[in-house]
Image: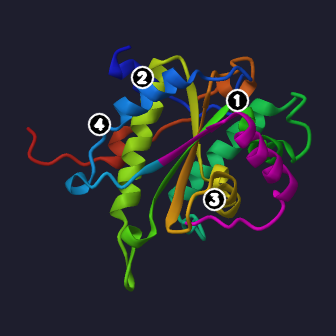
Amino acid sequence: MDITESVKQRKSIRAFKPDPVPKEVLQELMELALRAPSWANTQPWDFAIVSGAKLEEIRQTYIRIWDEESRTDLARPQGFPEPYNSRRQALGRRDVEVMKGTRDGQGEDWRRMLASRLYGAPCVIYIYTGRDFYLQGDSVNIWPIFDCGIIAENIMLLAVNSGLGTLPAILLVKYPDVLKKVLGIPDSKLIVLGIAIGYPDWDYPLNQAYSQREPLDNVAKWYGFE
């Protein structure tokens, strides 16, 4: 698939078919994703690619403790100043409208249901990095997190090329202590992001909707062009 088409088709998938993703498909995808750039080629990423019984253990634990306070390794936003809040609220209104009248859209619990069940994904790719590279004395080195974001985009675009869908979500790493216990990840690592991956359930209403983007002229200024 042309890279332009991968960019156009990539979207956040919130419901997956139960079909497992073959390991060889994921391995080829991940090996290609490793071509992502990073600061001085430090490659500050590690991955836990989880399916089957281990993922089900995580899922069932998340369902059981979902109402407990989030314990993410990285700080979540404490607020959303403008213009970011308006964009966030517009997405929320769109989701409610799309789900209106559906079985899952009844009441306020459908978001909780989707997230706590890891969106029904048959596989999740967890990205983590070294605590000692991120936290350096009294300062924070943000660049390994930035680089993890770059490779996450590689993964998601390559997934489209393989007929797969993805959802990058902080809620997938809401309880890093659970992930570290189940997967044996040492506390010397910070869990950055989870990417749910699998075959999209295109009958699910949210999977048929695309979020809007700001026009380029609203976010870009041009200099030195005639």
Q: Residue reaching furthest top? A: 1
For the residue marked with disc 1, what is the amino acid? Answer: Leu
Q: What is the CA distance from the residue labelled 3 to the residue labelled 1?
A: 31 Å
Q: Which mark is residue 85?
A: none
Q: What is the CA distance from the residue labelled 1 to the residue labelled 2?
A: 19 Å
The answer to whether residue 9 is visible is no
For the residue marked with disc 3, what is the amino acid? Answer: Lys
The local secondary structure at tag 3 comes to: helix
What residue is at 44 percent from the left and 42 percent from the top? 152
Q: What is the CA distance from the residue labelled 2 to the residue labelled 3?
A: 32 Å
The local secondary structure at tag 2 comes to: helix
| 113 relative to 159 in the view: left or right | right
Q: Quadrant of the image for the N terminus?
A: top left
> In the rendered structure, does residue 12 fall within the stretch colored magenta?
no
Q: What is the CA distance from the residue labelled 4 to the residue labelled 2?
A: 17 Å
Give the residue at mark 3.
180
Earlier in the chain: of badge 4 and badge 2, it is: 2
The answer to whether the residue labelled 1 contacts the one labelled 2, judged by CB atoms less than 8 Å apart, is: no
Q: What is the CA distance from the residue labelled 3 to the residue labelled 4?
A: 27 Å
Query: How many C-alpha atoms fall within 10 Å of the one at disc 2: few (<14), some, or many (≥20)?
Result: some
Q: Position of residue 77 (x, y in %)?
A: 57, 66
Earlier in the chain: of badge 3 and badge 1, it is: 3
From the viewer's side, name the closer residue of 64 and 7: 64
Q: Which mark is residue 6?
A: 2
Location of residue 30 by image quarter: top left
Q: Position of residue 106 (x, y in %)?
A: 91, 37
Location of residue 70 by image quarter: bottom right
Q: Which mark is residue 206?
A: 1
Give the residue at mark 4.
35
What residue is at 40 percent from the left and 18 percent from the top? 5
Q: Please, is residue 210 above or below residue 146 in the view?
A: above
